[in-house]
Amino acid sequence: MLARFATLAALPLLALAQSSEPVGNGTGVDENGKYEISSEGIRAHFIPYGASISNLFIKDVHGEERDVVLGFDNASYYEVDKQHPHLGGVPGRYANRIMNSTFEIDGEVFEVDANEHGGLNTLHGGKNGWDWRNWTVVAHTADSITFSLMDPDGEMGFPGDVISYVTYTLTPYDWHIYMSAFSLTHKTPIMLSSHTYWNLDGFQNPSTPLALNHTLHLPYSGQRIATDGILIPNGTVLPNQKHSINDFWSSPKQIGANFTNPDMLGNCGTNCTGYDTCYLVNRAQNGPYDWRAAPVATLSSPWSGIQVDVYTEQEAFQVYSCGGQNGTLTLKETQGLFNDTSRPRTVQQNGCVVMEVEDWIDAINQPEWQREKRNIYGPGDAPYVLEATYSFSLNQEAKNASCPGGY
């Protein structure tokens, strides 16, 4: 049964790999160890380490191509700099945090690698989580790439063998993500995400190197998960009251709009000002819906005019305003201002924003939320699946400001 299940899981990707042809040089890899895919109005680079996106190029209202995600210039550096903050990778086997680094399945308690806050909890699957490992490229075409990872039983303390596939595809102005994971031998928690860091100005806005001027709208997120001082859920769901610091649902607002509000202190953990918050995505009241029909989030920059609408079937959305950045992470050669020596070529605090599509965080330790069918998977179950589309356009207000009278 196990062999049959594993074979069925792998067949579609094996067939795709056999039918794919490499692009670029003979191996499809450029001189920096990156794989490029492209479509009209969009091109991107990916690397096997963490199945990570390392570059994403979009033209702005000024007609300039901006690299709007964080990463390193060379793929080899991801393994050298072990302090990198999960740049563009796929965290797993279970994304976000696990309280006390333990969980229970069918009466059995499992202890997983406690890699954060001095051993108080697990973050993104432990110190050897999926975004710290080299994935296998099983398919690469001009507009798509697929990675695969086999995660063995007991790795980081998680039970059972799990095989996962991640496919990134570009179509005109859109980046599509399809993630799947199959539990082969034991019930186990699975929750993935894309841990991409965004700055829609490519750090080239002469007025600011920060992302606090980016406008965010979360139209379905009138609630958020309450957490303690180290961002562990306490089981409570809180309202994002209209016009409060966590209200991004009633109307769009800049990420930094409320940073001077005293209520912001502690909003992202003890003594933290900003956001590291899991917002819930409430669409069920409208009846059956097509997740591709309306975005759960919109992020835009008034300077570059680049706007990204995020579509997903996931039911939670983590926003992190990069309060942990401290100016030590170097910008890529494709980013920043080269004629301004007064500005360091590093990522400053609040210089970016992370948007993670995922399920309710640490739901494996909150059984009253009744999320087990979206968090626990066993042999014979349907696979874990995550789908998302990041759709790019130019914000109309920015277009009008840049080109009075239109194009």
Image: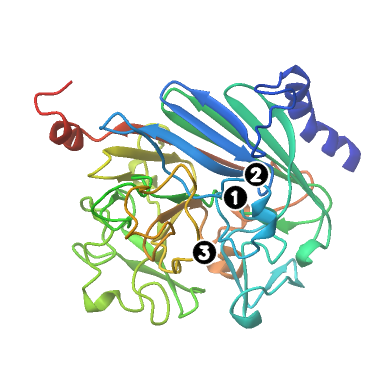
Determine whether, in the image, residue 66 is placed left or right of residue 170: left
Disc with the residue nearer the chain's start (3 vs 1):
1
Say which residue label 1 marks. 89
Element type at marker 2?
loop
Determine whether, in the image, residue 293 is placed left or right of residue 371: left
- Say which amino acid is labelled 2: Ala
Q: Are marks 1 and 2 in contact (CB under 8 Å)?
A: yes
Say which residue label 3 marks. 369
Q: Give me the residue at 67% from left, 39% from top.
A: 33
Q: Which mark is residue 155?
A: none
Element type at marker 1?
loop
Q: Residues within 10 Å of mark 3 (few under 14, many from 20)?
A: few
Q: Disc 3 versus disc 1: distance between alpha carbons?
A: 28 Å
Q: Nearer the viewer, mark 3 or mark 1?
A: 1
Determine whether, in the image, residue 18 is placed left or right of residue 56: right
Q: Find residue 191 and report its horizontal and vertical position in percent.
A: 61, 54
Q: Is residue 28 above or below residue 232?
A: above
In this view of the protein, which residue sits in the foreground, 164 or 168?
A: 168
Element type at marker 3?
helix
Q: Is residue 153 above or below residue 379?
A: below
Say which residue label 2 marks. 51
Q: Disc 1 versus disc 2: distance between alpha carbons?
A: 6 Å
Q: Find residue 181 and report its image quarter.
A: top right
- Say which amino acid is labelled 1: Gly
Disc with the residue nearer the chain's start (1 vs 2):
2
Q: Residues within 10 Å of mark 2 (few under 14, many from 20)?
A: many
Q: Find residue 261 and report its image quarter.
A: bottom left
Q: Give me the residue at 19% from left, 37% from top.
A: 398
Q: How many marks?
A: 3
In this view of the protein, which residue sits in the foreground, 192 or 395?
A: 395
Residue 1 seen in render: no
